[in-house]
Amino acid sequence: MPVCDTLPRGVSLASPIALSARFWGSLVLLLALTLGSVSCGGADGSAEAEQFNGTWSFDEERSTDISPWNDLTIEIEASSSRLTLERIWDGYYGVAVNDSMTIPIDGERHRVPMSQWPDNRHIGAFLGADSSKSVSAEWLDDGQTLRVTTHLNVRVSQGTTKIRTHSEYRVAPDGTTLTVLELRSSRPRPIRYTFTPAESS
């Protein structure tokens, strides 16, 4: 007697094969859709990082006073894993200070040499003997916030002290403004800087 004659009515040897084919076909389709959405969404964070890139001009009316400086320009080049940040402080009578650095965005501290400290405004503190700072950078809020933390040793009248600064960079959803919120251990109140794209200034 043929084997197929012993199977229940309506069931054939082809049924498991057909079910298996449909299962693997669905699995392949699901994987393709998943990989496609990851690729389009910028899983490496590069799409989110691009919104920070470019030259940003200081909006004096919406920012904390930066005197004795006259103006401040920020240039950012960021990827998912690396940051180049340049701040150009313009003073009166043509005096300018360029403060720049390039570090990995990995949450780890990295030593950055410095020749001047333009953030020193109206406080009796000066650069320490090592003339360097320790800086870390990391992405927060799914790439919508870039946090830069700086540790610095400075000289004061009583000796040497440490200053820690947390700076959070955020771009508005429409891309028209860059807001920098800065909290420094030596200041009781946070600092707020607002910038607009240089081409629209």
Image (tube, rainbow, N blue to C red):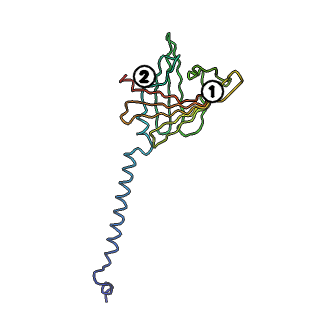
In this view of the protein, which residue sits in the foreground, 145 or 121? 121
Q: Which mark is residue 179?
A: none
Q: Amino acid at mark 2?
A: Glu
Q: Earlier in the sequence, mark 2 or mark 1?
A: 2
Side (left or right) of 10 relative to 105: left
> Relative to residue 23, is residue 167 depicted above or below?
above
Side (left or right) of 50 relative to 128: left
Residue 49: x and y in percent read: 44, 37
Q: Which mark is residue 132?
A: 1
- Quadrant that contains the C terminus: top left
Side (left or right) of 16 relative to 96: left
Q: Amino acid at mark 1?
A: Ser
Residue 123: x and y in percent read: 61, 21
- Quadrant that contains the N terminus: bottom left
Q: Nearer the viewer, mark 2 or mark 1?
A: 2
> Relative to residue 171, is residue 142 depicted above or below?
below
- Which residue ends up furthest to the front in the rendered image? 188
Determine the residue positioned at 40% across, 26% down. 196
The answer for how far apart the CA atoms under marks 2 and 1 are is 32 Å
Quarter occupied by residue 19 = bottom left
Where disc 2 sits, the SS reads helix
- Which residue ends up furthest to the right in the rendered image? 159
- Which residue ends up furthest to the bottom in the rendered image? 1
Determine the residue positioned at 50% across, 12% down. 92
Determine the residue positioned at 34% across, 58% down. 29
